[in-house]
Image: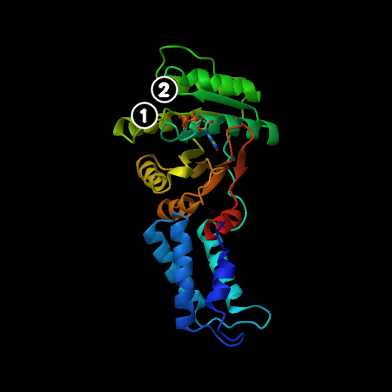
Amino acid sequence: MFDSLSSKLSGVFSGLSRRGRLSEGDVAEAMREVRMAMLEADVALPVVRDFVDKVRERAVGQEILESISPGQAVAKIVNDALIEALGGAGAATLNLSAAPPVAILMVGLQGSGKTTTTGKLGLRLSSRERKRVLLASLDVQRPAAQLQLQQLAERVGVTSLPILPGQSPQEITRRAMKTARQEGYDIVVLDTAGRLSIDEALMQEVREIREIAGPAETLLVVDAMTGQDAVNTAQHFNEAVGVTGVVMSRMDGDARGGAALSMKAMTGAPIKFVGMGEKPEALEEFYPERVAGRILG
Ligand code: GDP
């Protein structure tokens, strides 16, 4: 277990009187602890630097109330700034306000948890939000991919687009949108093909699919366990196809979530959900306040 940042900071400030303002010297030492906690949590270095600068500015000269210790005061400033940097308190929601059928495009590298997340999202939207949802796999690269989504859809009780062998991803997209319009679906979740690495062919395919479907959301699924690689992936996808939200899978592992902060800082795209396990129910909304606690330890 990591010591909580608040208790570490209390140690830093133990010699300080409870009254008065925080000096630059007091804060500098505290910022070393913050920096260390963030690097341990795998936050990218430039993001840590920016963050620490911002917090330092806020903390220096801060008057310490008698009711709290200087350590607690700085820990609160750090925590508040972190929540803000992660997108502000509360969960980021999906933008589903367009006229139905609303398309949601799922993108990401192979193995990131994209298909699993597509199934999870289908379940959430149909059971919690009472939407009529159609799932479609556009992955014609891996022979078993379309079947995998079909089985997942059956398991969660959501309809999937019937598989027609030989169709291109673009043709499947057109068919999915047409079916949704004709049969009155509210939402179509399109699971695009993943590749082992980011390549131009993949990005071009995603751009063409986006053109056809006109998605309200393009959600990038990244594996939280891959840390800095997940951040690089997010930057590439965002530059190439534009990402409206990120889903971090495998947050049930021991990743401390620093990648969430790096991704938000570097792409501006909000984290919308976190995957908390392999089961279809294991998808949670992203709450910056929870992840802030995890990053600070
Ligand atoms: P895709 O290639 O990106 O479509 O990846 P899959 O959806 O097939 O997922 C790859 C593996 O990761 C599967 O074994 C999933 O069960 C697993 N997986 C996906 N999301 C999570 C998650 O949030 N937590 C855990 N522990 N495993 C996950």
Residue at numbered disc 2: 169
Nearer to me, 133 or 266:
266
For residue 106, side relative to residue 125 (left or right)? left
Q: Earlier in the sequence, mark 1 or mark 2?
A: 2
- Residue at far front of view: 1
Q: Quadrant of the C terminus?
A: bottom right
Marking on residue 205? 1
Q: Secondary structure at mark 1?
A: helix
Number of numbered discs present?
A: 2
For residue 169, side relative to residue 65 (left or right)? left
Contact? badges 1 and 2 (CB < 8 Å): yes
Specify whether tag 2 is near ligand 1 (CB below 8 Å).
no
Nearer to me, 167 or 185:
167
The residue under the point 44% across, 77% down is 28
Colour scheme shown: rainbow
Nearer to me, 120 or 282:
282
Amino acid on which the number 1 mark rests in the picture? Glu
The residue under the point 55% across, 69% down is 8
Position in image of residue 227 (x %, y %): 43, 47
The residue under the point 44% across, 51% down is 263
